Image (cartoon, grey):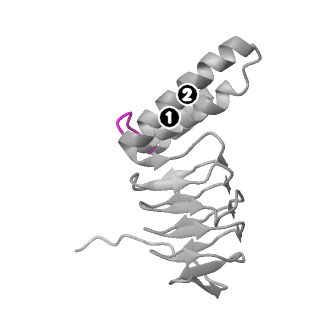
């Protein structure tokens, strides 16, 4: 737990960053599930849920301990993000503000691959799989599986395959 929190701090570089608060509470919640002593686990579990609701209300990010994610989850603009508790997220995923990752009337949730960028206001809904190296455009609504190396834009999401992400380079003015 503490090593993961150190890695999260390295990403955000400030104890005041709301995404760091959310991730620390998430890590605490996952840790409480490993406690063997029943009474202590129940007390810590109640403590987790109280803290989780407070932090969720303050930050407007709903990330419960049920979500599974890999290394380097980057909540880029931490406001108004909802992630379904059964969602699985891969490594190196960036999430912008006002994103919803959820179900479509069932308790099934999306599976998101590695190196995925989710743009502002995007909605990823249902029991679908988002492949590796995918960019999901702003305000896109994704309702179907997305193959690797794709770009998704529009409502409903239109998939553009064989998309190559261009690296942005800063060129200072002379």
Quadrant in which the C terminus is drawn? bottom left
Q: Position of residue 56 (x, y in %)?
A: 44, 41
The residue shown at (66%, 27%) is 31
Q: Main secondary structure of the magenta part?
A: loop
Q: Answer whether residue 6 is visible to the viewer in this image.
A: no
Q: Answer whether residue 129 is visible to the viewer in this image.
A: yes
Residue pointed to by mark 2: 48
Residue pointed to by mark 1: 52
Q: Position of residue 26 (x, y in %)?
A: 57, 37
The residue shown at (59%, 27%) is 2
| Callout 1–callout 2 Cβ contact below 8 Å | yes
The segment highlighted magenta reads 12-16
| Callout 2 secondary element | helix
Q: CA gap, disc 1 to disc 2?
A: 6 Å
Q: Is residue 62 above or below residue 106?
A: above
Q: Residue furthest front?
A: 105
Q: Is residue 125 above or below residue 4?
A: below
Q: Quadrant of residue 45?
A: top right
User: Looking at the rendered structure, which numbered label has been put on residue 62?
Assistant: none
Q: Position of residue 151 (x, y in %)?
A: 59, 80
How many numbered circles does the render carry?
2
| Callout 1 secondary element | helix
Q: Is residue 174 magenta?
A: no
Q: Is residue 13 magenta?
A: yes
Residue closest to the eye, 168 or 68: 68
């Amino acid at each position: 737990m503490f090593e993961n929190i150190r890695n999260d701090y390295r990403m955000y570089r400030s104890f005041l960053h709301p995404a760091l608060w959310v991730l620390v509470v998430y890590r605490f919640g996952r840790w409480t599930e490993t406690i063997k002593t029943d009474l202590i686990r129940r007390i810590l579990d109640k403590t987790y849920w109280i803290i989780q609701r407070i932090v969720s209300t303050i930050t407007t990010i709903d990330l419960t301990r049920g979500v599974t994610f890999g290394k380097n989850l980057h909540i880029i603009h931490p406001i108004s993000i909802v992630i379904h508790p059964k969602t699985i997220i891969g490594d190196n995923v960036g999430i912008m503000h006002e994103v919803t990752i959820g179900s479509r009337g069932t308790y099934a949730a999306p599976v998101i691959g590695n190196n995925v960028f989710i743009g502002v206001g995007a909605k990823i809904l249902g029991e679908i799989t988002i492949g590796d190296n995918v960019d999901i455009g702003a305000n896109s609504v994704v309702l179907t599986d997305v193959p690797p190396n794709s770009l998704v834009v529009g409502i409903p999401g239109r998939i553009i395959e064989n998309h190559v992400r261009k690296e942005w380079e800063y060129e200072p003015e002379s």
